[in-house]
Image (cartoon, helix red, strand yellow):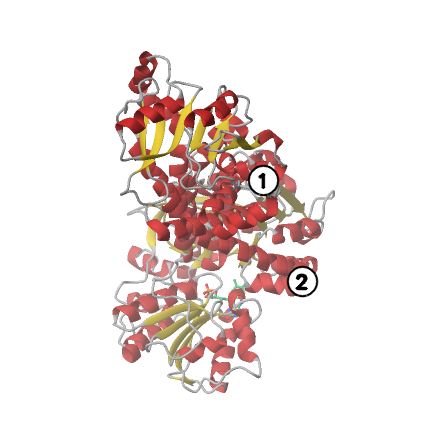
Amino acid sequence: MRLAARLREFNVMFQLHWILGITAGAILVVVAVTGALMSFQQEILDWINADITAQIQQAGEPLPPPAIIQHYAAAHPEQTISSMFWRNDRPYPVVVGYRTPQTTGRHGERIALNPATAQPIGDIRGETTFSFIRQLHQRLAAGATGKWLVGVSTLTLVVLCLTGLYVRWQRRPRRRWRWLWPRALGGKLAGEWHAVLGVWALLAYLLASLTGLWWSFDWYRDGARALFASGSRGDAVALDSAHAPLDLDRVWSTIAPRVTDAQTVSVRLPRGPGQPVAVHFVAADAPHRYANDELSVNPATGALLAAAPYRDRSAGDKLLESVYALHMGAFFGLPGIVFMMLASLCMPVFFVTGWLLYLRRRRMKRRVPASHAAPTRSGPQDGAILVAYASQSGLSHRIAVRTADALQKGGRAVRLAGLAELGVACLAAHDKALFIVSTYGEGDAPVAARRFDHQLGKPGAPQLAHLEYVLLALGDSDYGPTYCAFGQRLDRGLRERGARTLLAPIEVDKGDAAALDRWHAVLSQSFGAALTDADPGFSRWTLVERQILNPDGVGAPMAWLRLECAGAPSRAWQAGDIAEIRPRHGDPALAAWLSTHKIDSDVHELRAALAHKQLPTRVDLCGQTIRSWAVGLPDLAARDYSIANIDRGQGVELLVRLARDGDRTGIASGWLIEQARAGEQIDMRLRANPAFHTDAQRVAAPALFIGNGSGMAGLRAHLQARIADGHHDNWLIFGERQRAHDFYFQDEIRAWHEAGQICHLDLAFSRDVDDGRYVQHALAEHGERVRDWMARDAGVFICGSHDSMAPAVIATLREILGAEVFETLNIGQRIRLDVY
Ligand SMILES: Cc1cc2nc3c(=O)[nH]c(=O)nc-3n(C[C@H](O)[C@H](O)[C@H](O)COP(=O)(O)O)c2cc1C
């Protein structure tokens, strides 16, 4: 159960990370960018005010500070001077703070004076801009609310750092340097940059946020003081003389020798009786530019009341004194400031890449119209008709999407949902439902619907007397006793719970067009919904290339085919999707059948009509002409093939194994491999297969690919997609008969492996004397790694033979992970199948 708990923990961390990121991100961008702009505020101001500096230099020696105050005070008797700031390390105006009777607020007014003349120096360019930038940084220029928002966002940044680090650790790259450098430049690498820059910026963000909170929340500041202050420094110094008048010359004679070499000096004059003169200065040899020494001076006598040099303070006091320096990075000198600034400038990159990742996940998730949100668990929902599907290879899903669209266009409120995300209890929320389900395995529900299947069969399942439904069951009568078994079980379960069916379930054998027509008729008669837009029909594709991949192998020939769309560009597809091909009889087979039944084989039109039809063993025209009889024959069922590549404008690639029954070859595979010539037109359409897509929530999670034979097709498409997207946590376990003949796409796969784009490659060749293993054996050898990968949020993709491979692989996974964890992962659709 430890693994299951870790998986839950991961989900919580991940969700927290992206939800906080996309909500607080915009504020963090403002705060970070304004912070970066302030990193070199002083240098920028000096630069744009170079003329003022020159003016100061030309004016000669600076006056002593008391003289400046006296000059200024004499000229402005209505003002009370409250503070003075000057620099010794470079030519710079003296900044005098003063108050008038009209002044409100804590800080009063400020004026810049020429230190040599004590005359006002005029406006310092850029000061107002920087003051606004500071306002934005501290409070979004929006008063107390802004300050609170900045504070909360700063707290959020701490959580983002910690959850980001956790997610990165769980999905840690195998190679160390990849923590710190992305795998490639450009391309769709939002996730890679997000993660790598995150590691670089992490310390800076933690430092900036943990110190930034100092200005956001009183409780934080008080807490820090309680934790770190030594208590040896009292701020207030009690004075004997309550009403002592200020004697600037005496005060200055105490201060002057101590601050002659100081970089900067700030003097605060008493605002009321009983207060000392407070002096803060940064000594010439101070460890950083905000390491202030402090003096407290009696305003009347000039006696030194207290001196607190920075270097003599306790570590805790130094820390508290250095909060600003840490916040700015100045604590670590110039490199610290530069690092902090660059990290802050990266914040928009996180925001943008974070959103891109979020939108990508959403886009991938949105396989269905927007109104198909997950149903809630209570109360009928605005009369919405539920269209519920369970699909393993995408056909039921496609019919469900079209059905939902048709109902919506007919003005009905619709909720489209997979049984995977519906609990039985959700049915209470609807009084009308359409179920479109297929059967898999040996009469099982498709993997994603197994929990629903199980729930419905349990004695405590809720009553559904309010529910009316129609059911479309997809299956294949070749499976004999388990034909449409799940559809029938679902129908029984619903009826047993009191639900009423509006008509007997419609069974669709191998995608039978006549049964689907009946479904369309039901939709239009019972629900007023016409399927106006035609089912994406077959398009004409051209067979461009074909190659037998295992010419001398012991197994049946495996062909690689490339087809290009002959007409308008076909719809886009994604890794995991399926190509449906409408097969035809090869010319020799058709000629043989025609001659057996003594039908005139020279009529081209007739041959064309018969080529796509199921040819009966007996010909009984029942009075029809041979042509109308031929047209009425059922079509050959379309064949499904996993698409073996991603869409790069080079057409669709497939792997087709030649099927053999004694000395007869399969109709479709025989035609595709042995008879169709390059340039031949082939009817094909592409079908989305969501059950074998990458989970939109976990595109960047590691992926384990397991398959055999032509299952390489589905795995290869996924590998291509992931590698193109910069996701290299790929583990491929592939099995066939002989390494020398059956290692399909060997060059490509080896190159990926050598480039680190597949980090683990395990091969199993059952007919090789030095091997003799199957994929499940290769899997079993790496139990520890499997557990580790699953804990790192990995997804498993299994593609290939349903009979010989999938059950054994599933049993091995169950053994490695434990039945309970396996079920959790299975229900969570972390294990995805494309088996046939
Ligand atoms: C591995 C495998 C097992 C299947 N098992 C059954 C079965 O037991 N009974 C049945 O009626 N159809 C079975 N089928 C056929 C599917 O139900 C049929 O192809 C259906 O159209 C698939 O619909 P879907 O694409 O929505 O999953 C099976 C198909 C495959 C590939």
Residue wearing tag 2: 1
Would residue 574 be seen by someone viewing this image from the given angle?
A: no
Would residue 273 be seen by someone viewing this image from the given angle?
A: yes
User: What separation in Å lies between label 1 and label 2 (alpha carbons)?
Assistant: 54 Å
**Residue 302 - label:** none
Looking at numbered disc 2 in the image, what kind of residue is underneath it? Met
Crowd tier of the residue under label 2, counting other residues whose Cα lies within 10 Å: few below 14, some 14–19, many 20 or above = few
Q: How many marks?
A: 2
Of 558 and 815, nearer the camera is 815
**Tag 1 secondary structure:** loop
Whole-percent x, y for residue 834 in the image: 52, 57
In the image, is 143 to the left or to the right of 779?
left
Of 327 and 717, nearer the camera is 327
Labels 1, 2: front one: 1
Quadrant location of the N terminus in the rendered image: bottom right
| Residue under the point 53% across and 47% down | 164
In the image, is 531 to the left or to the right of 386?
left
In the image, is 59 to the left or to the right of 593?
left
Crowd tier of the residue under label 1, counting other residues whose Cα lies within 10 Å: few below 14, some 14–19, many 20 or above = some
**In the picture shown, does residue 134 fall above or below 16?**
above
**In the picture shown, does residue 352 fall above or below 519?**
above
Lower sequence index among marks 1 and 2: 2
Whole-percent x, y for residue 86 in the image: 40, 25
Whole-percent x, y for residue 204 in the image: 51, 37
Residue wearing tag 1: 233
**In the picture shown, does residue 145 fall above or below 40?**
below
**Tag 2 secondary structure:** loop
Quadrant location of the C terminus in the rendered image: bottom right
Check mark 1 vs ligand 1: CB closer than 8 Å? yes or no: no
Looking at numbered disc 1 in the image, what kind of residue is underneath it? Arg
Whole-percent x, y for residue 152 in the image: 44, 52
Of 275 and 550, nearer the camera is 275
